[in-house]
Amino acid sequence: MGRAGTGHAGAGRAERGHPPKAPAALREGDALPPLEIPITRTLIVAGAIASRDYQDVHHDAELAKERGSPDIFMNILTTNGLVGRYITDHFGPRAILRQVKIRLGAPNYPGDTMVLTGTIEEVTRAPEGVTATVRVVGANGMGKHVTGMVTVTVRAPSGGAAPADEARSARGPAPDGPAPDGPAPGGPAPVVAGGAA
């Protein structure tokens, strides 16, 4: 099982040691390798600040307790970002998130660990790439923190990359390097949190 590090986000790819399958090999029913994410105060507070969510329950333990919570807890935007990262880290630099629909359950409190898992529910192939719908579950010590569906497109390689180049590319960019072929024309579709999952 992979474990998210505390350093640069790209470092986790090599650390987990599970390069994704090439797009042509994706099949319905395939399971993504699990990813453990330690839930720290720093992660909760930094995620809230980065997403401009200044609600006191995400950074002030005393005020969170006054409101009936045992401690601060993670906001939905941080969870949404972690789900997106789980998918794009697995599918590699050619992955474009098309839709993210998540629902929250048990809160993520400091000191717990969330384990993200995913299963490919549907695969659609086209000349421009492969689109997969992935069911994602993030569980912590209290139960399911997040459940949902993510639709991701893995673009076909441009310029007829050799299979070895495709496999190397699927492992992701170097920790400080850009994706090998840049953003998709027109950019990615918006990512939406919420909705039934």
Image (spheres, rainbow, N blue to C red):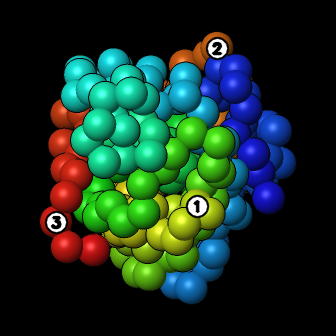
Q: Which residue is mark 3?
A: 195
**Three-letter amino acid code at disc 3?**
Gly
For disc 2, the marked residue is: 176
Marked residue nearer the N-terminal end (2 or 1): 1
**Is residue 96 visible to us here?**
no
The amino acid type found where label 2 is placed reads Asp
Tell me the residue at 30%/48% (across/down): 68
Q: Amino acid at mark 1?
A: Asn
Q: CA distance from mark 3 to mark 2?
A: 34 Å
Give 116 or 114, whichever is nearer the viewer: 114
Quarter placement of the C terminus: bottom left
Please name the residue shown 43% across and 73% down the image.
135
The quarter in which the N terminus is drawn is bottom right
Q: What's the mark number on residue 140?
A: 1
Residues at marks 2 and 1, CA–CA distance in whole angstroms: 30 Å
Please say if 67 is above or below 106.
above
Q: Residues within 10 Å of mark 1 (few under 14, many from 20)?
A: many
Residue 174: quarter of image = top right
Q: Nearer the viewer, residue 60 or 7?
A: 60
Q: Nearer the viewer, mark 3 or mark 2?
A: 3
The image shows residue 151 at horizontal and vertical percentages of 34, 62
As helix, strand or loop, the secondary structure at mark 3 comes to loop
